[in-house]
Structures are given as C-alpha cells and as structure tokens.
Image (spheres, rainbow, N blue to C red):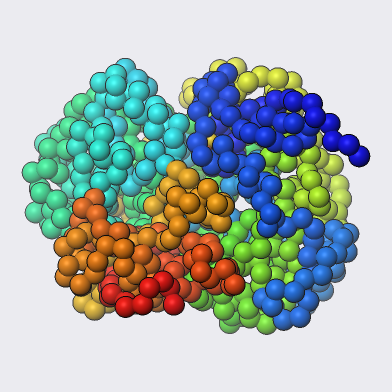
C-alpha cells in the first residue's frame, strides 16, 4: 500500500523521563520526521532535551524487538523462534497455571524497571488480582526512601515535589541532586527563583553544574548527608532558630533536641569533611533567610542503610525551619478527592492479607511487611479515607527475590516477568543477579522490552514492547501517581503500535484474560483511565483537547484544606513527629541518627570511596545508551578521580583502571577532575554495549559494569524499606597496562 505523504503534527507528552514535557510530533504520513518542544504547553513552554528530541530514533532503532520470540536451545544462547502473541501468551499462561498449582501464586514474580510510558506499573494490578504479592519495583532506590522519610515525619504528602516560587522562595537547597540533568523543568524554575533573589545552596560531593551557579557549595564526604543534616539541626536548635510553634505542637522535639547534642560540629565536621564554621553558617542561613525549599535527589535514596534516614532528617529540617505548608516553601500535596487513586486502581485490596504477608522482604523490612498497614491507616485519616497512597513503595524486595530463586528460601520463585527492566545491568551486585537468572530453578523467565539486553537474552520468551510514542498518556501527578493533587493530563497516542508491539496494559490485560481476570480489564488503557476519573465527572478525550495539565478546579484542589473531620498530618499522632512513633513500634531508632553501612568494616583494605551512576541529560538510566547520538557523546564508561588520588596510584588521565570493592571489580576509563575531592571515586553506571570493540558480545556485563561492585547485603540495606547501596562503597583503584577492557 502506498504511504500517505501528508505532513501533520500531533501533540504528545514525553515519557522519556519523569518531567512530562509537552512535545509536538511531526509526521510525514505515519512516519515521524522530527520532534520539537510544544511552546503552548504550560509546564514545559517549548523546552525539549536531547532524549525527547531523539525519541523517534529510539523508536525506529534497527535492533528493536518487533515480534514475540521464544528461546531455542540453551538459555542465553541467542537463538530464537518467532511466534505469535497468541502462542506466547497461551504458553506463558499454561506454565504459570502449572507453577501456581505446585508452589502457590507467590512463586510468580514481576519486576518493573524505569518509567517508559503512562501505563508503567499496571502489572501490579495483574499481580494483586492474581494473588501474588511479588511485584518488585525500583522504588527502594528511586524516591521511595524520601517519601517514607517524609511520611514518617509528617504523613503522606510528597513535599519534595515542591517547585520554588520566584519572588517568594528565598532559599533553595539542592541536596544530592543534579536537576539540570534529571529534572530540567525544576532546574529552570530554580534559576528563575534565583534570578528573583533566592539564595542557592548545593550539597554534593561533586562541583556540579548546579554548584557552579550556587552561592554556597558544601562538598561533603560521600554518604555523610545524615550527619550534615544533624549538624544543621544542632546549630538551629541550640541557637533557637527553629519555628517555636512547630516545636510546641509536634511530637518529640525535646528528644530531637537531646539527640542532636550527640552531633556537635566537631564530630559532624570530621564525618563530613567540612569546616564546622561553614556548617553553622549555612544552618543559620537556611533557618533565617525566609521560605526555603529542599530538593533531595536520588543520590540520597541510593545510600543503602541511610536512605530513609536521609529522607527523615531533611523532612525534620523542613518542619523545624517552618517551611512546611509555607508559601514559597514546601506544600503538602495529596490525592484528588474524587478520583480513584493509583493504589486503589492497582487493586491492592484484592490481595488477601495472608498472601500479602508472604511478600519477599516483609520479614526483614517493616514497610514491606506489616508496618505498611500502620502507615496506610495514619495517612488515610488525613486524606478523607483514601487508602493505599503509598502502596507503590511497599513492593517486594529485589535482593530477597534473587535469594529466593537461588536457594528456594523463604520459598521458591519459579517464574519472573521482567518489564522494561535489565537487572543484570542495573541492580546491585549484578554477578549474583546474572547467576539467579541463569539458575534452572527459575523455570520461566519472560521479558517485555524494546530490545534484547543482558537480562532479556536469558529469557524463555521476549515480548515486543510498544514505545511510549505508541501509547496514550495519562497522569495525575509526578510519575503518574495520584498524589500531587492538582494535576491531570491526558493525551492520545501519537502513533498506533507498529509491528507486533504491545503496551504494558495490553500485555497484562491479555494475560489476565487467560488467568481468570476477564471482568477486571476494560478493553483499552484509555477506558481503564476513564474509569478512574469518571467519579470526578471528567472525560479522557475532552481533556486531550486541553494543552497541559488541568489545574485549579474544585475537583483537584479541596485537598489543600484540612477539614474538621481530618487530622493535620497523616501520622499516628496527627502531628509532625520528630520522634517517629512508627519507627519506635518497629523496634527501630525513632530519632534521626547517622551510621555507616556494614561494608565499611573493610575500609582498611579499601581506602577510597566509590559513588556511582550520576545522571546525564542525554540518558535516562540505561535508555538509549546504545544509540549513536549517545555513544558519540559518551563512547566509554568513565571513572572520575582527583589528580592527587591518581598521582598516589600512578594513574594517568585517559588510562583504563581497575576499580575494586569487597563485592567485585571492573575496569573503566579515567578522567581526572578537581570537581571531586581526593579520595572520592565516581564511576559511570552500566554501559551498553560495553565497548565498541566488544560488539561480538554486546551483552556482557562483567567488564565495565560498576554494579559488579555495589552491594545488596542485608547490613548495607536500609532497615525500613530495604534499599541497596549504590553510593558510598569502600574501594581501591589500580592502573592496568593493556588498552581497553580486555
Ligand atoms: S526533560 Fe527531556 S526526556 Fe524529560 S520529559 Fe522533557 S523532553 Fe522528555
């Protein structure tokens, strides 16, 4: 059939990261010729970054998987048979049925990777309806610890999503975050606020682009953020710079005041590697300048044992300095009252309490286990009875899943469905992950993805995923969750799915229909989303005619007001809790504290400190790393060292070196920089393919993947939520003689 050559433009909302920029997709017939920013979009105003501008190149990439593939021969052998979706889903459903009969529904696990379309996460609905508690998410290292830290302190309401208000916000603290790369729209707003007079403080071990713009940069030692926050509070409390009304009306202020006495500036100075006078000066600035926002990044969420403590101490600072519910400071969000929220949409209540108790990690991490109910009950009192607002963070624990596959403890996991997730690249201690995926005890491995990658090449079935340009869009908040409270945006798919590509929704609907869920899945994702907003008398298609999110209607806004029937904060006491009653109930320290992860017992042999995976504007996690435009800019995985460190070990700029931790070792290419302190080693995340000379085996992961060196050992994981340690691992470096990675 002859292709139409009609030139058209269609609106789209970008899902290449979580910023949700408005885009214009330019087409010749049904072929995208280019993508530009949509100037009429109220949030992004025409902004587009390289990921959005090149999105169609990823969609049209030559190595996309276009049809369902079934493994031939040995696992990982690379031989595939093309089959129909019907055959693939029938066979997968049959195998699942057989495994459930022998081992129970909990033997089926599903692991989700990064954001990749508005129906990201819908598999959790299938799993709850099916009866398995083992949906595994990346929430443990991506925003989850921040949300939990806030929730324990002042109840649900992710105040860390607050944007500064130019002219009102007087101080911005960027903490462990590179918004210029990870959140460009937030960064743009920060620059506007700064131009309107706000002070900018950057807390980061690296002299980042943000630090270059800052009034003050605090170059703390990697992984010592909690100690710094306690040092700030020491000055703020001892000099009575805190909000007296907040202290009076909260729970545990006196206990906190006593606790911070254990963190005098001399001690904090030694831990953080910062002058005590500078810590005190910045504490005074934060407490007295006026409305302040604290923007905490995922660097803090990937701090293993300190991840939730990072969220907790910053939440305490927000409250203590009177910046909660303050114009120009932080505002508590909340779910839209009349719409069906994300947790409810994911059918959380369909999973029986007995099955939920079996969730992997529930026995070790309270928020994954019984503690979730206490948090949920407390939040529900604040948000007019809405349930399951944080269910997306109470997912199963990935390291425990690898253990269950390999050892059968606490029970066997025999089937795993990976969705847009490459754990062999992205998880901690990836050699162990690869062993688990190769293990014969795992009887069924399915991957739904755009590409074959290091994990999906081990699968029994690879199912072709639709790119976000082939999916409709729906969001009621950041990351598509219903918790911001003033946000709703919809859009039709710019393209219909090509070849055999299917969206997440379509996959789970079709699998669900084969496994007894026929009445639970409307035919399309759009119909499903319509059912969520129908109670608020909203219409998906009508909303697509509106450019940008809908703000300010009575439907979205009443949650800002606290009614007589509600408590002020979604904590058990209904108050701000500097001493957390929930942590106390769980047998954990109710007050903020600093501790190093267990792996530091090896520090004598590994005298440097490794941090990994800083964000780049050109890439969103592993997405697009194989694309020519990305590889041209970043041809090799790089490790950055201070020249003094390099000189100590006889290392030259541009050399390949060995990076070693107690967990493993890899090689990367050295770049010398004074942006880092001596002693800090900052390594890129997984590179795919690993090196241009290695194309004959593009899926190998052991040569340069820094996650061979990161840790998910229990003593390094967060005690509340179980997040693993990607930042702040003791390491050593040695020069290697040969060029390249082998
Ligand atoms: S910042 Fe870039 S990748 Fe993220 S939504 Fe905007 S255009 Fe897309």
Residue 130 vs residue 353, the one in the foreground: 130
User: For the image shown, how many numbered marks are present on the structure?
Assistant: 0
**With respect to residue 404, does 12 lie above or below?**
above
Q: Quadrant of residue 163?
A: top left
Q: Residue at x 35, y 23 (%)?
A: 192
Q: Residue at x 39, y 45 (%)?
A: 297
Residue 315 vs residue 138, the one in the foreground: 138
**With respect to residue 272, does 618 lie above or below?**
above
Residue 300 vs residue 684, the one in the foreground: 684
Q: Residue at x 26, y 29 (%)?
A: 171
Q: Is residue 231 left or right of residue 38?
A: left
**With respect to residue 630, does 174 lie above or below?**
above
Q: Report if residue 628 is visible in the image.
A: yes
Residue 560 vs residue 201, the one in the foreground: 201
Q: Quadrant of residue 126?
A: bottom right
Q: Is residue 35 left or right of residue 191?
A: right
Residue 476 position in % (x across, y down): 61, 32
Q: Report if residue 719 is visible in the image.
A: no
The C terminus - image quarter: bottom left
Q: Quadrant of residue 330?
A: top left
The N terminus - image quarter: top right
Residue 531 position in % (x across, y down): 76, 34
Residue 372 position in % (x across, y down): 53, 53
**With respect to residue 361, does 328 lie above or below?**
above
Residue 146 position in % (x across, y down): 41, 47
Q: Residue at x 48, y 74 (%)?
A: 702
Q: Is residue 86 left or right of residue 333?
A: right
């Amino acid at each position: 059939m002859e292709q139409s050559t009609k030139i058209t433009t269609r609106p789209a909302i970008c899902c290449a990261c979580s910023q949700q920029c408005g885009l214009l997709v330019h087409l010749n017939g049904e072929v995208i010729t280019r993508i530009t920013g949509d100037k009429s979009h109220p949030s992004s105003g025409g902004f587009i970054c390289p990921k959005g501008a090149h999105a169609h190149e990823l969609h049209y990439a030559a190595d996309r998987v276009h049809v369902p593939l079934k493994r031939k021969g040995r696992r990982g052998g690379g031989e595939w048979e093309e089959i129909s979706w019907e055959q693939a889903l029938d066979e997968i459903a049959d195998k699942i049925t057989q495994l459930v009969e022998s081992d129970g529904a909990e033997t089926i696990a599903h692991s989700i990777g990064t954001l990749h379309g508005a129906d990201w996460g819908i598999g959790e609905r299938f799993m709850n309806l099916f009866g398995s508690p083992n949906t595994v998410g990346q929430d443990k290292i991506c925003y989850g610890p921040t949300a939990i830290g806030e929730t324990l302190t002042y109840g649900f309401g992710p105040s860390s999503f607050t944007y500064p208000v130019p002219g009102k916000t007087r101080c911005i603290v960027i903490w462990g975050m590179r918004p210029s790369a990870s959140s460009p729209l937030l960064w743009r707003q920060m620059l506007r606020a700064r131009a309107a007079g706000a002070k900018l403080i950057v807390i980061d071990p690296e002299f980042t682009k943000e630090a270059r713009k800052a009034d003050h940069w605090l170059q703390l030692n990697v992984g010592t953020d909690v100690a710094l926050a306690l040092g700030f509070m020491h000055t703020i409390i001892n000099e009575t710079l805190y909000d007296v009304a907040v202290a009076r009306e909260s729970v545990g202020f006196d206990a906190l005041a006593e606790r911070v006495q254990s963190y005098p500036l001399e001690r904090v100075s030694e831990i953080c590697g910062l002058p005590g006078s500078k810590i005190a000066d910045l504490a005074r600035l934060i407490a007295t300048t006026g409305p302040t926002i604290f923007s905490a990044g995922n660097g803090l969420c990937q701090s293993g044992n300190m991840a939730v403590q990072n969220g907790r101490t910053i939440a305490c600072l927000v409250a203590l300095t009177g910046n909660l519910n303050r114009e120009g400071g932080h505002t508590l969000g909340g779910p839209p009252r009349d719409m069906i929220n994300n947790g409810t949409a994911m059918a959380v209540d369909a999973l029986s309490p007995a099955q939920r108790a079996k969730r992997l990690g529930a026995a070790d991490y309270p928020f994954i286990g019984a503690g979730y109910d206490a948090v949920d009950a407390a939040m529900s009192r604040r948000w007019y009875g809405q349930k399951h607002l944080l269910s997306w963070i109470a997912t199963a624990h990935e390291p425990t899943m690898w253990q269950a596959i390999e050892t059968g403890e606490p029970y066997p996991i025999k089937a795993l469905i990976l969705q847009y997730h490459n754990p062999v690249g992205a998880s901690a201690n990836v050699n162990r992950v690869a062993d688990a995926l190769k293990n014969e005890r795992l009887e069924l491995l399915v991957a739904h993805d755009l590409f074959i990658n290091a994990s999906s090449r081990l699968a029994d079935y690879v199912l072709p995923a639709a790119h976000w340009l082939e999916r409709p869009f729906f969001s009621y908040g950041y990351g598509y969750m219903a918790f911001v409270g003033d946000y709703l945006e919809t859009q039709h798919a710019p393209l219909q799915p090509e070849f055999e590509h299917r969206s997440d929704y379509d996959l789970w609907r079709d699998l669900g229909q084969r496994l007894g869920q026929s009445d639970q899945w409307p035919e399309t994702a759009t119909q499903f989303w319509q059912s969520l907003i129908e109670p608020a008398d909203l219409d998906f298609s009508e909303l697509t005619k509106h450019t940008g999110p809908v703000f300010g209607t009575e439907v979205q806004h009443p949650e800002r007001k606290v009614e007589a029937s509600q408590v002020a904060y979604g904590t058990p006491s209904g108050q701000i809790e500097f001493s957390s009653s929930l942590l106390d109930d769980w047998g954990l320290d109710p007050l903020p504290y600093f501790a190093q992860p267990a792996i530091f017992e090896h520090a004598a042999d590994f005298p440097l400190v490794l941090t990994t995976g800083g964000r780049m504007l050109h890439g969103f996690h592993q997405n697009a790393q194989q694309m020519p435009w990305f590889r041209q800019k970043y041809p090799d995985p790089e490790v950055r060292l201070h020249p003094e460190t390099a000189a100590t070990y006889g290392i030259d700029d541009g050399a390949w070196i060995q990076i070693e931790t107690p967990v493993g070792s890899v090689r990367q290419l050295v770049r010398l920089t004074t942006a880092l302190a001596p002693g800090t080693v900052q390594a890129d995340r997984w590179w795919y393919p690993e090196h241009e000379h290695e194309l004959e085996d593009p899926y190998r992961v052991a040569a340069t993947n820094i996650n061979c060196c990161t840790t998910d050992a229990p003593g390094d994981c967060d005690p509340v939520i179980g997040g693993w340690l990607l930042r702040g691992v003791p390491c050593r470096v040695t020069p290697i003689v040969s060029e390249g990675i082998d």
